[in-house]
Image: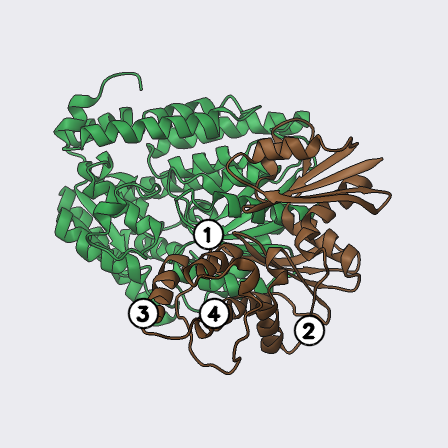
Amino acid sequence: MISLGIDIGSRFIKAIWIENGEIVKLKKTETSYEPLKKCEEIINELKTEKIVATGYGRHLLGFNGDITTITEIKAFAIGCKALIQDCRTIIDIGGQDTKVINIDEEGNVKKFEMNDKCAAGTGRFLEIMAQALGFSLEEFGEIKVNLNDSINISSMCTVFAESEVISMIAKGIPRENIVLAIHKAIAKRIVSMLRKINITESIAFAGGCASNFLLKTLIESEISKKLVTHQLSALAGALGAAIYAEKN
Amino acid sequence: MTKDYTQLWESLGLNLGKHEGLLTVLSDAYKNIYLSQKNRPEGMKYFDFVISEVHGLRIEELYEAKKNKRKVIGTFCVYVPEELILAVDGVFVGLCAGAEVGFEEAEEYVPRNTCALIKAFMGFKLAGLCPYAEMTDLIVGETTCDGKKKAYEIFNDITKKMYVMEIPNMKNESDRILWLNEVEKFKIKLENLTVKKITLDNLKKAVNIVNEKRKALKRLSKLRAYDPVPISGLDALLVNQISFYDDPIRFTQKVNELCDELEERVKRGEGVFPKGKTRILIAGSPFAIPNWKLHAIIENSGAVVVGEESCVGSRNYRELTDEKFSTVEEGIQKIASRYLTIDCACFTPNSERIDNIKNLKKALNADGVIHYSLQFCTPYMMESFKIDKLVDFPFMRIETDYSMEDFGQLKTRIEAFLETLQ
């Protein structure tokens, strides 16, 4: 019996098919302006017994037939627990939401925090800033910077921060320094969210931004703890949904 | 609406085009949010009617009352003693403050980062969309928060109708004296405005009318403790919202009729939702009509709201006024001390509020508490952090306003909170 977990995020749709707990197939595609069509294509790729949808667009599928939905908070809890067994804290930085989650030994959500209503401190923010500085999102977190550089950006609003960045460029500040300032601002925001829940020993870093090395380093130095990532970190939500589908 | 009120609205100076637009939006929202609910009690039909006529028949009633030399007094806060208004045969109405209306106009007078409730009451008036404000002879404000205090100064420049009561920030002996003086001053203000004396007889009657209204609302609240719950949170919220607009005697009667029906439902073991639904108590800022956002999201996510620890909710009806008094002065004292039991977040310290939340959660058999603060409502926002650390039950903080832009995030957060409760 094959189960599909499908995570419809604001930027990407991630899908994982599992059979008896083993991953059979995975897929990541841009959400685009026709997410439902994309989802239908994904669903038709493989004959599946059970489907669970999660992510920002989960109700798109929930409204269309017998597809169960769970929130990405629950999905990341299950998915991260499967990838990183001993994790009790999860940081998930997605396209338009940032979440920090505490889970128990069984992977149940104990406490969580999530950004309110703007894109401040989310993946989308990084993407816009990368664009403003002429980097691709992939390069953005790999740029060599001097961690001791002291410039900061003060605004976390995507719109204002972009104009702040533009004025820094106009002042002739090297773009590597601006890159650091942007990442520091996000790291600070994540850490303040983390302080509202419990920062446990083992911390999983998941979601689309988990591959951003600079962000990871900055958060680690701020809380003096290591963040654990996994090659499937960005797909942890889809994996969690698939595991949930198989078990229920 | 049963008839055409255009002439009435025009005579009040409303912006007819915009007002028409507002009523259309409201009526659509009401259909989607309210009339689409299943298993609603028959008794809600009256409240549906009141809403459909909220800018119609009720305004006409106020018009009639004014013709009979009665005064219409507008308020924004549960601290304004309704008893005194009724004792001088005045009409007590809450003013429009619950929708994102006239914000552009309001932002000419107040900063952008002002709470939605303040921006809305300014906006409704400035955009010419609140027939109640136009009907009033006096608008009573109160010094509950900095935003309101300063906004009332501006509102007075615009309306020339403001009267502001000073609410103390603490509840010490000196504060009690200050508040008693404020209530006495308000009594004189009302007597001068209406040219009517407050007598022992009319004060006793007024206290009784308001107490009966509060008792009916308490009765409704108690019925929400049952599982299955006989009424949706949305419907119960609506009844609470209408308590600020309707004629108090008729309202009390209709709430009691609704409660009779709900009691029958409870006896038969019937509910508006199946037994075993996840039960939520909401605590925090007021829900001015037509702010139904949070209830709608929660009840569309598979849970039921069983109570509101809010000014539009338990803060409005929890305590009654002691009816045993034999002079007007004594009556005024009883009224003043009743109002000081209100645990508004503008007080410091305000530890009784935490106990009230705990007790209400227990009494209503709620599984968890969602603390709701209007964005930029500092007193409630600050208290929510404190309460979070002091309670041992599932608790989630939400800050939001009247706009729909955070709908997706709120839905995710609320669903995730509900998942932790199942």
| Disc number placed over residue B22 in the picture, else none | none
Q: Earlier in the sequence, mark 4 or mark 1?
A: 1
Chain for numbered disc 1: A
Residue type beneath disc 2: Lys
Judge depth for marks 2 and 4 and give the one in front.
4
Query: What hue does chain A carry in this figure?
Result: brown
> What's the colour scheme?
by chain
Residue A179 — which label? Answer: 4
**Quadrant position of residue A81:** bottom right
Q: Position of residue A46 (x, y in %)?
A: 76, 33
Residue at which label 1 appears: A117
The residue lying at 45 percent from left, 75 percent from top is A177
Q: Which residue is mark 2?
A: A226
> Alpha-carbon distance for marks 1 and 2?
29 Å
Q: Secondary structure at mark 1?
A: loop
Q: Which residue is mark 3?
A: A170
Chain in green on the image: B
Q: Residues within 10 Å of mark 2 (few under 14, many from 20)?
A: some
> Which residue does the image show at 21% across and 46% down from the upper left?
B105
> Which of the marked residues, 3 or 2, is nearer the chain's N terminus?
3
Q: Look at label 3 and name its amino acid.
A: Ala
> Is label 2 on the same chain as label 4?
yes
Direction from residue B354 to residue B14 in the image, left or right = left
User: How far separated are the C-alphas under marks 3 and 2?
Assistant: 36 Å
Q: Is residue B167 left or right of residue B162?
A: right
Q: Which numbered disc flags the more N-terminal residue, 1 or 3? A: 1
Circle 1 packing at 10 Å, graded few (<14), some (14-19), many (20+), is some
Which of the two discs, 1 and 2, sits closer to the camera? 2
